[in-house]
Image: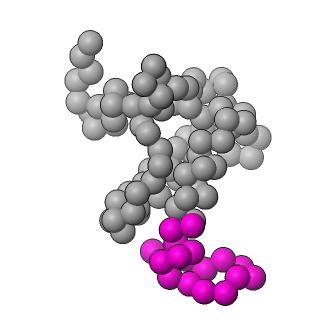
Amino acid sequence: MELDFFNEEGSGLGPTLEFYQLFSQEMLNPELNLWRKTDKYDLFPSPFQTFKSKKYTLLEIFELLGVLVGRAMLDGRIIQINISPVFWKILLNKPVSQ
């Protein structure tokens, strides 16, 4: 993926890396209340009723997150979102044990 920002010069790696960084920061925005932090500061999705957005549903936000995380993995980029190991197991349909 290669990005260009409106009213800015340049394209390629710099703006693309900046996009991934800005996206990661926005997904961690506490005002959205997307996540609850675990004891180790890993992230686990918050319950539906605590999500605060009038424009998008929680499912739409997590679908976007999934698409962009997948794209970042294909591009070999790192996104700074520390997802809980328990949540990863749930996503991968693996058993969660205590």
Please say whether residue 3 is one of the residues in the magenta stretch: yes
- Residue 30 visible in the picture: yes
Position above or below: 16 against 72: below
**Prevailing secondary structure of the magenta residues:** loop
Looking at the rendered image, the quarter that the C terminus falls into is top left
Give the image location of residue 66, x and y in percent.
44, 50
Position above or below: 37 against 5: above
User: Is 46 displayed left or right of 55 in the figure?
Assistant: left
Count numbered badges in the picture.
Answer: 0
- Residue at 27%, 21% (x, y): give it: 96
Looking at the rendered image, the quarter that the N terminus falls into is bottom left
The residue positioned farthest toward the bottom in the image shown: 9
Magenta segment: 1-18
Q: Nearer the viewer, residue 35 or 14?
A: 14
Residue 28 in which image quadrant? top right
Residue 3 in which image quadrant? bottom right
Identify the coloring.
one colour
Q: Nearer the viewer, residue 33 or 64?
A: 33
Give the image location of residue 27, x and y in percent.
59, 46
User: Is 9 displayed left or right of 77 in the figure?
Assistant: right
Position above or below: 67 against 31: below
Please say whether residue 78 is one of the residues in the magenta stretch: no
Give the image location of residue 14, x and y in percent.
53, 76
The residue positioned farthest toward the top in the image shown: 98
- Residue 44 visible in the picture: no
- Residue at 43%, 25% (x, y): give it: 40
Residue 6 in which image quadrant? bottom right
- Residue at 47%, 28% (x, y): give it: 41
Give the image location of residue 68, x and y in percent.
47, 58
